[in-house]
Image (tube, rainbow, N blue to C red):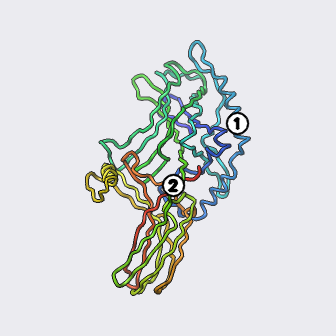
């Protein structure tokens, strides 16, 4: 990405480069888009994106490009005037372009937040024959929670990671392009990248070129962070009985409560008593995002076993990710309806469950079972499921 903003001809380009070792062992994986709250209504888009990923440059080519970039960066020496030497045009390894069905698609990289450092090159580009005076160049690595609707402690965002390094002291830039490598050795990143309706978790590199009497020129480059989790040792089945007295009694069973993002949900629905005429039955997967100061109070109350809490405001957004009919027609007593739902087939970006992230927000998933009778009355029951990530990608 290239950016210039009333900067006297100075353009900043930030390349976040994937580590070759991370690519080879699956800790850095190419993806075609940043996770989003939106539901993709094009049922063919997922396969199109996968076809584009097949056209990502092979690891050997990426390694050769990075070695060339490394050799170029080795030319970076500071002369007595503290002026970086001229560098050839760098390659953007943080975002490639793959060609598949439907044209070109941008390919980014998802990083394992527990093991991968952040590294790359900053390019400062000017028109030939120009110079640029500055008061120092800094680079930051930030992990931030942004809240558009819910304000927490009087702030709309919160930085849980903030690292700063000086790239270049005050001076003057003369070269057409100046390239400066950077590297942040970061500890475990606590949360995944998430772009919700009212909340987002972002990781990005920010370059600041300080100017005298003027605000600094800034350029942000985001990266995608994902966290691998382990399946809980105890993953008990979900068993519940619901109904209407002397009219309807059903028992539903799901094999487990915890599911990885490409898992499938399997269970059975047993009709123990049926005295109303049911027209059809459907199963939906729901995502619920909650944010605001009330989230902290609700989390503390839940830890103490209290359910009804009204301390603080909570902004709630509910989204139906998928819905499908599992029965059409009236069931009879003793009938069993099998259920099998593949999470990987949902045309939305599933994320792991966020449980009270820094007491500022939660993201939870529910199975919603709905029965509709011939008078169009709806009977439903929701059950929370826990999602976790098995692999990067």
The mark found on residue 156 in the picture is none
- Residue sitting at x 57%, y 36%: 117
Does residue 330 appear anywhere in the picture? no
Name the residue tied to disc 2.
232
For the point 62% across and 19% down, the residue is 77
50 and 129: which is toward the camera: 50
User: Does residue 386 sit above or below 382 in this rendering?
Assistant: above
Q: Position of residue 46 (x, y in %)?
A: 60, 59
Q: Nearer the viewer, mark 1 or mark 2?
A: 2
Quadrant of the frame with the N terminus: top right
Q: Report the residue that reaches farthest toward the top.
A: 80
- Separation of marks 1 and 2 at Cα, in angstroms: 41 Å
Q: Position of residue 259 (x, y in %)?
A: 52, 60
Residue sitting nearer the eye, 323 or 212: 323
Q: State whether residue 34 appears in this view.
A: yes
Q: Is 91 in front, or is 262? A: 262
Mark 2 nearby-residue class (10 Å; few <14, some 14–19, many ≥20): few
Question: What residue did someone put label 1 on?
Answer: 65
Whether 242 is drawn above or below 80: the answer is below
């Amino acid at each position: 990405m290239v950016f210039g903003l009333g900067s006297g001809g100075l353009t900043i380009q930030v390349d976040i480069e994937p580590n070759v070792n991370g690519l080879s062992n699956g800790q850095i994986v190419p993806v075609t888009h940043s996770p989003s709250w939106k539901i993709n209504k094009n049922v063919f888009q997922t396969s199109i994106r996968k076809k584009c990923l097949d056209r990502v440059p092979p690891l050997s080519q990426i390694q050769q490009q990075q070695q060339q970039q490394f050799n170029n960066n080795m030319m970076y020496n500071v002369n007595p005037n503290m002026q970086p030497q001229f560098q050839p045009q760098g390659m953007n390894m943080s975002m490639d372009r793959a060609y598949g069905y439907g044209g070109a698609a941008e390919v980014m990289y998802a990083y394992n937040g527990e093991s991968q450092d952040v590294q790359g090159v900053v390019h400062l580009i000017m028109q030939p024959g120009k110079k640029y005076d500055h008061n120092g160049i800094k680079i930051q690595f930030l992990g931030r929670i942004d809240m558009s609707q819910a304000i927490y402690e009087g702030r709309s965002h919160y930085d849980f990671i903030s690292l700063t390094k000086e790239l270049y002291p005050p001076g003057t830039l003369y070269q057409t392009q100046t390239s400066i490598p950077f590297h942040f050795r970061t500890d475990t990143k606590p949360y995944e990248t998430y772009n919700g309706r009212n909340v987002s978790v972002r990781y990005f590199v920010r370059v600041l070129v300080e100017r005298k009497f003027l605000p600094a020129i800034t350029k942000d480059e985001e990266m995608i962070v994902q966290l691998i989790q382990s399946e809980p040792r105890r993953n008990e089945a979900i068993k519940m009985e619901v109904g209407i007295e002397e009219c309807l009694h059903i028992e539903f069973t799901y094999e487990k409560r915890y599911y990885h993002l490409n898992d499938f949900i399997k269970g059975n629905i047993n009709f123990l008593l049926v005295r109303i005429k049911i027209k059809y039955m459907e199963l939906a997967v729901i995502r619920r995002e909650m944010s605001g100061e009330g989230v902290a109070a609700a989390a503390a109350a839940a830890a103490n076993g209290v359910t009804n809490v009204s301390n603080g405001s909570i902004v709630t957004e509910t989204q139906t990710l998928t819905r499908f009919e599992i029965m059409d027609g009236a069931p009879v007593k003793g009938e069993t309806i099998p259920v099998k739902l593949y999470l990987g087939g949902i045309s939305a970006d599933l994320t792991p469950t966020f449980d009270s992230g820094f007491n500022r927000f939660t993201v939870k998933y529910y199975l919603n079972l709905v029965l509709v009778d011939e008078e169009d009355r709806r009977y439903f029951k929701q059950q929370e499921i826990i999602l976790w990530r098995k692999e990067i990608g």
